[in-house]
Every structure is written in structure tokens, then in C-alpha cells.
Amino acid sequence: MGLTGTALAIDAGNSKTDVALVSTDGRLLGTARGGGFQPPVVGAARAVDVLTPLVDSALAQAGLTGPVDHISAFLANADLPVEETDLTTEITGRGWARTVTVRNDTFALLRAGLPDGGDPVGVAVVCGAGINCVGLGHHGATARFPSIGRISGDWGGGAYLADEAVWSAARAEDGRGDPTELARALPAHFGLTTMRELIEAFHLRAIPDHRRHELTPLLFAVAASGDPIARTIITRQAEEVALLATVALQRLDLLDEPTPVILGGSVLAARHPLLHDHVTHLLTERAPKAAPHVVTAPPVLGAALDALDQAGATPEAYERMRGAWG
């Protein structure tokens, strides 16, 4: 059933949350940004509490108090069906909208990268703080991965790359590993001289854990200078991205037809040549009909487009919505 009027589009990631109030004719009526969305850490109720001031702010910008017709919520850590169900129940209970759909936030990237109208078929790989992949095939087929970390077989993402860089640099300094420029560059970034000093600073919280993400761009810089250890880490990341996309395409029986492969998240959106070129090369070898492209639009756009899908919006509404996000 088509929806009319207004909808809330939510993209909630590990590090930031975006909420947009949209009209179903494609106008952007209000936006708000807040902190990360982490129900595994704080529980579903407290995680959804993070959304409350953002929803209130977006509605206030349009002079509304709600409820809107629909919420399209794409949420980090909604990795398992039971988590989607719990979060749907929690958001529905807030009374913000008459109907609610909840999906993992990687689907927002996929929707943002797919054409408007027609059969939504494609695969998306997000590599930001973490890594995940989803795919949509014909007749409603879906490909998913649990994406819970090492226990579900995952490798990569910005946080993981930073830890790999520290691991390799520590072993290089103490003799257990091959030499690498990372052993000098990583502590130098924090004004330190040795990896031992950096290890101690991390361990004693003299450097907060959240600052480890600063090491990921440094890893890419060292790799670009030709350092073999840094390059090996980046190459492994490219292998994982291509592997996720290829397996999803295979599961959906899409290897033999032209299919969009949407790449996004901070690590992939940066288009580091070593990573990007290797990903596209591997996809050319393993899935030659795949059409990879990087999406840099905010994922909340995908949530807004999904809200228009629910409303049965016109082509003009989709064009207006995409234009609102540049």
C-alpha cells in the first residue's frame, strides 16, 4: 500500500547517525546528525534513545510533531533476524510513525547505488569501521552475511586494518616480524619514538582507544610508499572485498549477467589506488560482468529512497530527492 505525506529516513552507523524527514514527493524537510548506534553495547532500548532527539529535531524543522507515515531505518548491528525484530519493536513502540521497516545499514548503501524503479538487483560491500556485504537478486532473493566479526569469519574494515598495522609494527620492532616503516610511522604519529612506547600508551589509555582509527590512513600512506608489509595488508583487504562481492553474486545466480556492485564506507570511498585498483582487477577476473562503482553519497540517501519506494513515488520525486543530497 502506498504511503502519502511524510516519512523518516534513518541511517544509524557505529560512529554516527543521520535522520532525515522527507516528503513523499521528494522534498527534504529536515535533517539531524548524532552519535553512534550500538545496541550490542547498550541494549536496543538505549540505542534507540539516541534517535529520539534526532527525530525530534528533524520534525521540528518542518514544524511537525508526528507521527509520520513511515520510517525506513537502516541500522548498524542489525545483523541477525532477531536483532531486526527487536529493533523494529523498539522503534515502533516510540510512536514516531504508523509503519516501520528495519534493515541492516549496508542495504542503505545498496539502495543509494541502485537505479530508481525497476527490479532492485545488485550487491553492496561496505568497508568503513567494519566490513559487510548484502545483495538483492531477482524475485526477492537476498544474500547476507552475519558480519559480527571474527566469529562470523569477517576480516577487515578500518578498525581491523589499524590493529593489523599495530600488530605488524610491534613484531617488526621486537624481531618476530619482517621490518616495516610502520614501526616508525605509527608511534611518530602520536609524537612517540618506539612501538613499545605506543603499545604502553594504548594499554594504559594514555592514548584513547578511539584514536586508533587515525592509523588507518597512515597505513595506506606507508603502503603507497612501497612498504611491503603495509601493501600486504591492503592487498588482503582487497581480496576480502572482492571475495564478499563474488560470493554474494554467486549465491544470487548473478555471475552471468551485468550486475551493479556498489562499494562504499570510508575505506572504499577514499579510492586509495592500491585498494581500489586491486578490488576492480579481482572482480574483473572473478565476476567479469559485475559493474563496480563507488558511492560517496551519505547512506541516509538510501534510506530516503527506500521511503519513496514504500510510497510508490514518481520519477520526479526520486530526482528531487537525489538532487537534495547533491
Image (cartoon, grey):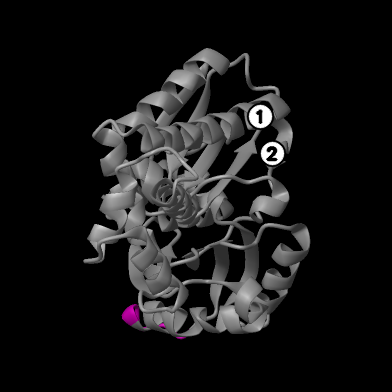
- In the image, residue 64 lies in the stretch drawn in magenta: yes
What's the mark number on residue 143?
2
- Is residue 174 among the parts visible in the rendering? yes
Classify 10 Å Cα crowding around label 1: few (below 14), some (14-19), many (20 and above).
some
Disc 1 designates what residue? 247
Screen quadrant of the N terminus? bottom right
Question: Are the residues flagged by discs 1 and 2 in contact, CB closer than 8 Å?
Answer: yes
Q: Residue 97's image quarter?
A: bottom right
Dominant SS type (magenta): loop
Position of residue 325 measured from the top left corner of the image (x, y, whole percent): 30, 54
Left or right relative to 66: residue 143: right
SS at mark 1? helix
Position of residue 286 measured from the top left corner of the image (x, y, whole percent): 57, 17
Mark earlier in primary sequence (1, 2): 2
| Amino acid type indicated by mark 1 | Val
Q: Nearer the viewer, residue 90 or 318?
A: 90
What's the mark number on residue 128?
none
> How far apart are labels 1 and 2 at the CA level?
9 Å
Position of residue 319 measured from the top left corner of the image (x, y, whole percent): 34, 44
Image point 37% across, 54% down: which residue? Answer: 298
**Residue stretch in magenta:** 61-65
Q: Nearer the viewer, residue 117 or 236?
A: 236
Image point 45% across, 31% down: which residue? Answer: 235
| Amino acid type indicated by mark 2 | Ala
Where is 79 relative to 175, above or below? below
Image point 65% across, 61% down: which residue? Answer: 78
Residue pushed farthest front?
175
- In the image, residue 309 lies in the stretch drawn in magenta: no
